[in-house]
Image: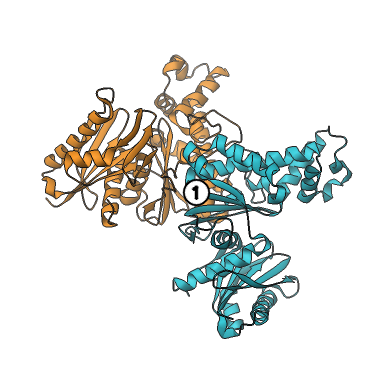
Chain colours: A orange, B cyan
């Protein structure tokens, strides 16, 4: 067994971990509950450190075989100092992730924004491999984003670039989780999809829709996807509209960045042609001719591994650049 | 007299030229009519070459003192090969600008997109000096854009990045010159400002507006600006709305790029606080907290020199990187 990297993906519900060879191949994975309510940040950092060591061990690697641990976490955070400034969902403030995990593991630890890590994962080993310029949109509870330019993530001056879920698609419009209105996320996230579906249901019609059987406070984007797949016209039209709205935002990014690849990840991206058809048609109609012709819009390839692979890959990138 | 650079800014009406020291100081400028109708591309290339040599001469520099000629031109173009692929306004197709001007002048010639050149001019010697990440929006007949990242223009895979005028601000919306709808340019360009003003006039009210004295087919954005300055409530509200719409687009770019500086150039940008107030308020309300706090939104500093200074600066950058 040669030298390995550990990638950790810190989420509100689960902590995912993976051991990778330096060429990016995942050789071992594990998942544990985050349980932030049990002990808060110090306990979660300990859980992540132990998970990292355990996966390395299961991969047959001793500590000296581990090149580095990369951690992807929600932000805002400072990737240079390795500090999570605050996370609304975990309610952490100024947590020294890299320093503490380095102390607990004795290994180099690099912290990165989870959306940036996901983007880098797809660039390094997934659907965006080798692209000079690519970006990702991850459709989950929110809409995550990440831009990779010339092999490096675009982080901006304060590590808060690439928030592509908060690109406006309307001058006014739906209220977004960020407090603004009209953001892409307010429409194309799972939350936005549910809200738009409820609006349609409230507007009447479609008496036979299976979605009418689900209590409105329990409707999920997965329900809408399932109903669309089963042929429900209301659900289909919500998914198609989601594609068209994504297409408008992607057209703007195509005109601004002239990228080779746009990767769509997250649960809803599994809708296939029903979602990707309207996305591609809208981008062709709305973007300038040359960037519209260039951009390939493709589903993410790494699935659940995305965050861990990206965090590990960014750790390797920073090691090679002499970071830490 | 030390060594100098020549910057040329090719427009539909005029060709501007400037001689600069290598530190960016403009020491001589000149302007001649483009007169594309007299001889088309070959004649215009000859005029640009002669202008370059004449300005160098007037600056007291012999040919051997000229480091390079930088040409900013409308596109799409290929900055690497120096070929204008096509220009809708001049009706050129596949014109080898760099090669032909090099032949005519015996000097290194570098071609760049005019909006990118303007952005680089403000980065190199204007309001964006020293910014790690900045972008410009130039409000003219259209809305030009340019992004400068780590001292280099963002050109994209096909030299068509940075078309920030064609970022959508509405899912549907006003028809844009590019054929799409809802682009920033359809609202905030001179054309968009006139169209929105005419809509307001047609909607009635404001019987005393001085704009009612101007035939609708002759109304200009400058008229709207002048009326706003003179206190016309209708004109003021159009300018303020222009600011708010620009603010929405800038909020999206702040969230995507987390830049230090946004430079606003072009005629309407001279409106001062009446325009910049709503821009800044909207960005604070719509962008995420950290990028909103970071971004400074400022008027362009170089005025008419912007394009020439930027084209010359990019020529110097490419010379230093061993281009051509």
In the image, residue B187 sits, relative to residue A35, either above or below, namely below
Q: How many marks?
A: 1
Q: Is residue B164 visible?
A: yes
Residue A265, quarter of the rendered image: top left
For this view, does A122 lie left or right of residue B91?
left
For this view, does A37 lie left or right of residue A146?
left
Q: Position of residue A230 (x, y in %)?
A: 42, 26
Q: Is residue B175 visible?
A: no
Name the residue rendered at 46%, 53% in the picture. Answer: A259
In the image, residue A194 sits, relative to residue B60, either above or below, namely above
Q: Report the chain holding disc 1.
A: B
In the image, residue B36 sits, relative to residue B262, either above or below, namely below
Label 1 sits on residue: B259
As rendered, which of B313 and B203 lies closer to the eye?
B313
Name the residue rendered at 43%, 45% in the picture. Answer: A158
In the image, residue A291 sits, relative to residue B232, either above or below, namely below
Q: Mark 1 packing: few (<14 Cα in 10 Å), some, or many (20+)?
A: many
- Seen as rendered, the residue at the extreme front is B1
| Location of the N terminus of chain B (image quadrant) | bottom right
Q: Position of residue A231 (x, y in %)?
A: 45, 27
Residue A171, quarter of the rendered image: top right
Q: Position of residue B314 (x, y in %)?
A: 53, 67
**Helix, strand or loop under label 1:** loop
Name the residue rendered at 13%, 43% in the picture. Answer: A59
Q: Position of residue A244 (x, y in %)?
A: 53, 38
């Amino acid at each position: 067994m040669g030298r390995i990297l550990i990638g950790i993906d810190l989420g509100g519900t689960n902590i995912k971990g993976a051991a990778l060879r330096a060429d990016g191949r995942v050789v071992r994975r594990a998942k544990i509950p985050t349980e932030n309510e049990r002990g808060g940040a110090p306990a979660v950092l300990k859980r992540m450190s132990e998970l990292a060591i355990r996966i390395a061990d299961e991969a047959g690697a001793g500590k000296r075989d581990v090149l580095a641990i990369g951690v992807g976490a929600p932000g805002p955070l400072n990737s240079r100092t390795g500090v999570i400034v605050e996370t609304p969902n975990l309610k952490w403030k100024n947590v020294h992730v890299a320093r503490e995990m380095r102390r607990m593991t004795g290994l180099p630890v690099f912290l990165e924004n989870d959306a940036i890590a996901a983007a880098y994962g797809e660039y390094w080993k997934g659907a965006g491999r080798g692209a000079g310029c690519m970006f990702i949109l991850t459709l989950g509870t929110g809409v995550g984003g990440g831009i990779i330019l010339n092999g490096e993530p675009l982080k901006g001056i304060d590590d808060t670039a690439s928030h592509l879920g908060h690109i406006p698609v309307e001058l006014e419009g739906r209220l977004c989780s960020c407090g603004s209105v009209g953001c892409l996320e307010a429409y194309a996230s799972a939350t936005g999809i549910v809200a738009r579906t409820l609006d349609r249901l409230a507007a009447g019609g479609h008496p036979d829709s299976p979605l009418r059987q689900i209590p409105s406070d329990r409707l999920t984007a997965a329900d809408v996807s399932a109903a669309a797949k089963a042929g429900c016209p209301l659900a289909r039209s919500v998914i198609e509209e989601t594609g068209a709205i994504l297409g408008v935002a992607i057209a703007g990014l195509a005109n601004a960045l002239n990228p080779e690849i746009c990767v769509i990840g997250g649960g809803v991206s599994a809708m296939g042609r029903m979602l990707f058809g309207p996305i591609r048609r809208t981008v062709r109609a709305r973007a300038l001719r040359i960037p519209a012709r260039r951009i390939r819009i493709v589903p993410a390839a790494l699935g659940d591994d995305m965050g861990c692979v990206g965090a590990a890959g960014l750790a390797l990138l920073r090691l090679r650049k002499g970071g830490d």
